[in-house]
Amino acid sequence: MEIRRVVTGHDEKGRAVFKSDEAIAGTPVEGGVAEFALCWTTDRSPADNDDPVDGATRAVGLACPGGTVLRFVDIAPGRRSPMHRTNSIDYGIVISGELDLELDDGAMTHLRPGDVVVQRGTMHAWVNNGANWCRIAFVLIDAKPASVGGKVLPPTH
């Protein structure tokens, strides 16, 4: 996997400039289920546009407490992610291929390119039942843990 990432910023006169234009390589996930390409993170929200840190170099888990994460995920054909939950609101946009979203009760929905998922702290797994790789882009924004009946539902990562 390789994602082209263009980052803008400002010069000393306040004019918009390109700070970088480069390829971000994917990193295989244990077991060969998927590849992750971390394109950017912020360590707070609202974000600090003057932060000099390259957001792709910040150490984060799946989500970033207090901040945001932009990650592309390629999921191999015939593979599935573990069932998991994060303390974030996640916007997932299918770029290519097809994918099934499975919830903890076994309910599934099929996703195609252009489909959008808004994941709100639920237990879920991604399943690629197709013959081709699937690419999905995720924006994860730190959120309070989901709760039901006053009971906090813990993250699994």
Image (spheres, rainbow, N blue to C red):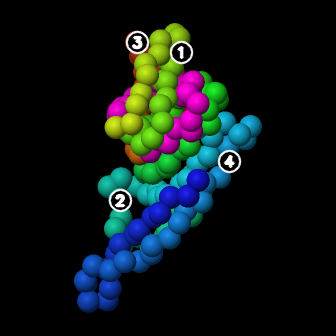
Residue bearing mark 2: 47
Depth order, front residue of 124/132: 132
Residue bearing mark 4: 28
Note whether 62 is above or below 70 in the view shown.
above
Residue interval drawn in magenta: 115-138
Q: CA distance from mark 3 to mark 1?
A: 18 Å
Task: For marks 3 and 1, give the one nearer the viewer.
Answer: 1
Indicate the secondary structure of the residue bearing disc 2.
loop
Residue visible at 63% across and 40% down? Answer: 34
Q: As shown in the figure, which amino acid type bears the numbered disc 1?
A: Asp
Q: CA distance from mark 1 to mark 2?
A: 33 Å
Q: As shown in the figure, which amino acid type bears the numbered disc 2?
A: Ala
Residue 64: % across, % down = 50, 48
Q: Decide: marks 1, 4 in contact (CB < 8 A)?
A: no
Q: CA distance from mark 2 to mark 4?
A: 28 Å
The mark that comes first in sequence, 2 or 4, is 4
Residue bearing mark 3: 149
Q: As shown in the figure, which amino acid type bears the numbered disc 4?
A: Pro
Residue 104: mark in rendering: 1
Q: Decide: marks 4, 3 in contact (CB < 8 A)?
A: no
Residue 69: % across, % down = 46, 50
Mark 3, Cα crowd under 10 Å, few <14 / some 14-19 / many 20+, is few
Note whether 120 is above or below 42 in the view shown.
above
Residue visible at 40% across and 31% down? Answer: 112
Q: CA distance from mark 2 to mark 3?
A: 32 Å
